[in-house]
Image (tube, rainbow, N blue to C red):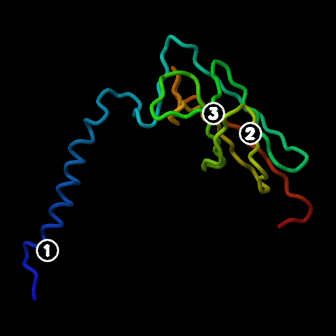
């Protein structure tokens, strides 16, 4: 039995309509020209802007340990669904573009790293995991760790 032309076109028309509504609505989504609320937590300008620095060391077991040096920021372990715009929370640790850990205190063991160069980024986050934004943008720091090759490794 043949399907009617209308029944074959209907699913295509529905998808086309949905895509068209997104195209029309997208430009007005962020008309305030501010960072999207679902991703970023803009801190008030009347508070000191947090700062973060980072150092890395290899411990005797071969693991890498990061030390986050923060100012005007407080680490806490409690996460909430909708955080106030305050400089308290944790940091997300990213290695070579991939999140590898959340730091709820200033010292975090990120384990062993394979030989080679690794870009490590720490981004301060609010208690609801949104990235903190200060007057100058994203509050983050980055270092590069060079892990030497041992012996005749290939």
Rendered-image quadrant of the N terminus: bottom left
Task: Determine whether, in the image, residue 111 is placed left or right of residue 84.
Answer: right
Kindly identify the residue that appears in the image at 35 percent across and 28 percent down.
Answer: 33
| Image x and y of residue 129, in percent | 52, 36
Residue 35 lies, with reference to residue 22, above or below; the image says above
Task: Determine whether, in the image, residue 101 is placed left or right of residue 107.
Answer: left
Name the residue that disc number 3 marks.
77
Disc 3: CA contacts within 10 A as few (<14), some (14-19) or many (>=20): few
| Image x and y of residue 52, in percent | 67, 27
Name the residue that disc number 1 marks.
8
| Image x and y of residue 121, in percent | 65, 39
| Residue 102: assigned label | none
Rendered-image quadrant of the C terminus: bottom right
Kindly identify the residue that appears in the image at 47 percent across and 32 percent down.
Answer: 40
N-terminal of the pair, mark 1 or mark 3, is 1
Disc 1: CA contacts within 10 A as few (<14), some (14-19) or many (>=20): few
N-terminal of the pair, mark 3 or mark 2, is 3
Disc 2: CA contacts within 10 A as few (<14), some (14-19) or many (>=20): some
Name the residue that disc number 2 marks.
108
Distance from the alpha carbon under mark 3 to that under mark 2: 13 Å
Return the residue nearer the eye: 9 or 116: 9
| Image x and y of residue 107, in percent | 75, 35
Q: Dot 3 lies on which element?
A: loop
């Amino acid at each position: 039995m043949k399907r009617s032309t209308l029944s074959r076109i209907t699913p295509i028309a529905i998808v086309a309509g949905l895509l068209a509504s997104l195209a029309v609505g997208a430009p007005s989504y962020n008309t305030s020209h501010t960072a999207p609320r679902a991703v970023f937590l803009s801190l008030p300008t009347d508070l000191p802007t947090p700062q973060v620095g980072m150092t890395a060391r290899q411990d005797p077991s071969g693991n890498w340990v990061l030390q986050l040096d923060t100012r005007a920021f407080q680490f806490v372990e409690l996460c909430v669904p909708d955080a106030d715009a305050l400089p308290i929370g944790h940091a997300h640790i990213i290695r070579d573009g991939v999140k590898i850990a959340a730091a709820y205190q200033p010292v975090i063991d990120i384990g062993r790293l394979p030989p080679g160069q690794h870009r490590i980024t720490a981004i301060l986050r609010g208690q609801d995991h949104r990235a903190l934004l200060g007057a100058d943008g994203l509050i983050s720091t980055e270092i590069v760790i060079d892990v030497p090759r041992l012996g005749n490794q290939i």
